[in-house]
Image (cartoon, rainbow, N blue to C red):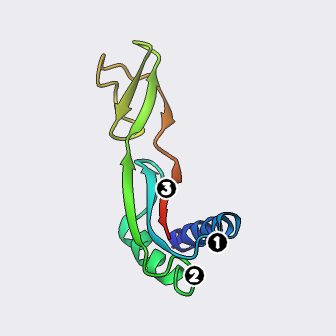
Amino acid sequence: MHEMSLCEGIRTVIEDSARANGFTKVRSIRVEIGKFAGVEKPALEFAFDVVMRGSVAEGARLEMIDLPGKALCYDCVEEVEIETRLSPCPKCGGGKLMPNGGDEMRIKDLEVV
């Protein structure tokens, strides 16, 4: 389950930020997750609760924000949202697409005390 290691990375970022900015408690964290990031949300939620125990983020609410899959269509030269990496272009139906978004995962913001 790589969601556990993702949460360990999140905890490291939170702890580093707490030391640098002087906060002692995280109430909530918003994480953006791309459609193609390969993250299982229920597993991430479970791992988050486990990994945050004993940290400034213990008991924090995790909010996951979905980001769409994106690609550049070489047929119509448009950036489009796609459902799967092999989807045709929703604008022109072309099949020459280069995925260029949707595989990211990042902390958007924290609510802290």
When asked about the image quadrant of residue 23, the answer is bottom right
Q: Residue at left 43%, top 58%?
A: 30
| Residue 61 spot, x, y in % from top left | 39, 71
Q: Position of residue 71 (x, y in %)?
A: 45, 29
The secondary structure type at the circle numbered 1 is helix
Callout 2 touching callout 3 (CB < 8 Å): no
Estimate the spatial distance between the alpha carbons at disc 3 and disc 1, rounded to whole Å: 14 Å
Report the label total: 3
Q: Amino acid at mark 1?
A: Glu
Decide: few, some or many residues near mark 3? Use Cα within 10 Å; few <14, some 14-19, many ≥20: few
Question: Left or right: where does residue 17 sit relative to residue 27?
Answer: right
Give the residue pinned by disc 3: 109
Horizontally, residue 92 falls left or right of residue 14, namely left
x%, y% of residue 14? 60, 67
Q: Nearer the viewer, residue 96 or 63?
A: 63
Relative to 32, residue 68 above or below? above
Up the image or down, 84 lies above or below 78; here it is below
Amino acid of disc 3: Asp
N-terminal label among 1 and 2: 1
Label 2 and label 3: CA atoms lie apart by: 17 Å
Which residue is painted at 52% across and 85% down in the image?
53
Single out the residue that lies furthest toward the bottom: 54
Within 10 Å of the Cα at label 2, are there few (<14), some (14-19), or many (20+) other Cα atoms? Answer: some
Mark 3 vs 1, N-terminal side: 1
Question: Badges 1 and 2: C-beta atoms under 8 Å apart?
Answer: yes
Residue at image location 42% in from the left, 13% down from the top? 75
Name the one closer to the observer, 39 or 31. 31
Q: Which residue is mark 1?
A: 15
Sequence-wise, the earlier of marks 2 and 3 is 2
For badge 2, the amino acid type reads Ser
Please name the residue that numbered disc 2 is placed on. Answer: 55
Farthest residue, direction top: 76
